[in-house]
Amino acid sequence: MIEIVVYGQPAPQGSKRLVGKVMLESSKKVQPWRQDVKQAVLSQYNGLPIESAVDIGIEFRFQRPKGHFNGKGGLRPKAPEHLISRGHGDIDKLLRATLDALSISTGGSLLSDDSLVVRVRSSKCYCVEGELPGAYIRVAILPDTRKQ
């Protein structure tokens, strides 16, 4: 099992737009997030790029807005338990940005390509006290069980 902890603001991969002959990412937050993921992999994983099927689990963590807290710093009773705001992005778009950042084919260094991901478990939630925003990534290389 490979575990990577990424600190930073998770960002969803949005739509692309054509400018001249170049496709540009619509969201300005995607590049910094991808860079955070790439740097985390470089500092926490020193193996060869993975070239077989993998099962990936990613837990995205976001800071709660200040409005979720009362004047004494406690969580307001009406603060939502689950992170469902549109501003943090759809989970599938968060996955796209993060998996691309892991893939050599798009500048990463952990997976030779994100097509190797055959199973994904993912969640997005608010940080608990003392946690920093980012993502916890767990990668399991799946055995090839074909009979030779």
Image (tube, rainbow, N blue to C red):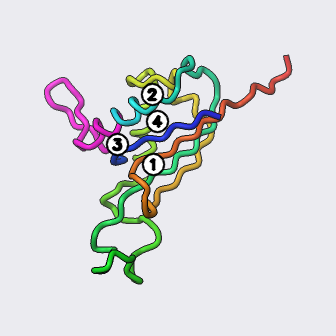
Asked whether, in this view, residue 2 is left or right of residue 14, the answer is right
For badge 2, the amino acid type reads Ser
Q: Residues within 10 Å of mark 3 (few under 14, many from 20)?
A: many
* Marks 4 and 1, how far apart at CA: 10 Å
Local secondary structure at mark 3: loop
For badge 3, the amino acid type reads Gln
* Marks 4 and 3, how far apart at CA: 10 Å
| Residue highlighted by disc 2 | 43
Q: Is residue 48 above or below residue 74?
A: above
**In which quarter of the view is residue 53 placed?**
top right
Q: Is residue 132 visible?
A: yes
Q: Residues within 10 Å of mark 2 (few under 14, many from 20)?
A: few
Label 4 close to label 1 by CB (< 8 Å): no
Q: Position of residue 92 (x, y in %)?
A: 45, 48
| Residue highlighted by disc 3 | 13
Q: Residues within 10 Å of mark 1 (few under 14, many from 20)?
A: few
Q: Which residues are magenta?
A: 13-34
Q: Earlier in the sequence, mark 2 or mark 4?
A: 2
Quadrant where the C terminus lies? top right
- For the point 44% across and 25% down, the residue is 42
For badge 4, the amino acid type reads Leu
- For the point 85% across and 21% down, the residue is 147
* Marks 2 and 3, how far apart at CA: 23 Å
Q: Earlier in the sequence, mark 4 or mark 1?
A: 1
Disc assigned to residue 92: 1
Q: Position of residue 16 (x, y in %)?
A: 27, 38
Q: Earlier in the sequence, mark 3 or mark 1?
A: 3
| Residue highlighted by disc 4 | 99
Quadrant where the N terminus lies? top right
